Image (cartoon, helix red, strand yellow):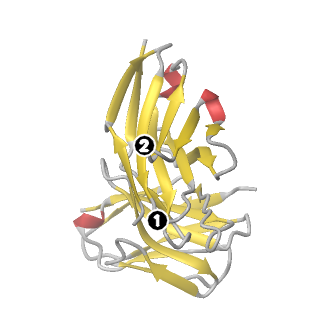
Amino acid sequence: NAGVTQTPKFRILKIGQSMTLQCTQDMNHNYMYWYRQDPGMGLKLIYYSVGAGITDKGEVPNGYNVSRSTTEDFPLRLELAAPSQTSVYFCASSPLAGASYYNEQFFGPGTRLTVL
Amino acid sequence: AQSVTQLGSHVSVSEGALVLLRCNYSSSVPPYLFWYVQYPNQGLQLLLKYTSAATLVKGINGFEAEFKKSETSFHLTKPSAHMSDAAEYFCAVNNQAGTALIFGKGTTLSVSS
């Protein structure tokens, strides 16, 4: 199993450009997540998905969009990139969640995005 | 409401010394607690997890953590630090719905020879 894979590893965008960060998992996990990590701030949840066709906002969704057409893929779209979106983005997946409260997550290697 | 507080954004120890990274949580539901480690330029890797089976949890690389409900704490320890332990460590707790994790701000561990 490759686990959670993310592409690209690095990207530089100009203000106003758009791009899609790709995330794929091969563990057949129902739950998938997008986080951003800024220095000294920990991880902030952007969006998550509980299964194909179902997504929901996290703590910091503004400026981002997601879709989930398959169990494996959970792309994150940035429209009209802004310098405030300069960050490291992590995708994660989880096999279990919900009523049991248990939510162990598996992380991808991250995408480092700079907006200039 | 769910939250996690990691005391100390930076901890420095000598090689061979005890490592103690502090985590306090707040939870209105049965908490599941996690410690993740992040090496430079890498993703997060699970160190250990508390799932209510045992209060003393052993993880990878010689780390362990003890769940103390009365103190709402889940501190991470290692008896003897190695240079390879230098990394950022994150404590996390499940959210109220069990649909996501809430992370602390992280503690950077430095190990000197």
Q: Secondary structure at mark 2?
A: strand
Q: Are marks 2 and 1 on the same chain?
A: yes
Q: Which of the numbered marks, if any, corresponds to residue A28?
A: none
Q: Amino acid at mark 2?
A: Cys
Which residue is under mark 1? B28
Q: Quadrant of the N terminus of chain B?
A: bottom left
Q: Amino acid at mark 1?
A: Ser
Lateral position of residue A65 relative to residue A116, left or right: right
Which residue is under mark 2? B23
Q: Secondary structure at mark 1?
A: loop
As drawn, the residue found furthest toward the front would be: B70
> Where does the image place residue B55, in percent across and percent down from the top left?
62, 42
> Where does the image place residue B11, in percent across and percent down from the top left?
35, 29
Q: Label 1: chain? A: B
The residue lying at 32 percent from left, 33 percent from top is B10
- State the separation of the CA atoms marked 2 and 1: 17 Å
Q: Is residue B19 above or below residue B65?
A: above
Which image quarter: residue A73?
Answer: bottom right
The residue lying at 52 percent from left, 65 percent from top is B29
As drawn, the residue found furthest toward the bottom would be: A53
Which image quarter: residue A58?
Answer: bottom left
> Where does the image place residue B35, in percent across and percent down from the top left?
53, 45
Lateral position of residue B56 relative to residue A64, left or right: right
Name the foreground residue: B104 vs B39. Answer: B104
Name the foreground residue: B24 vs A22. Answer: B24
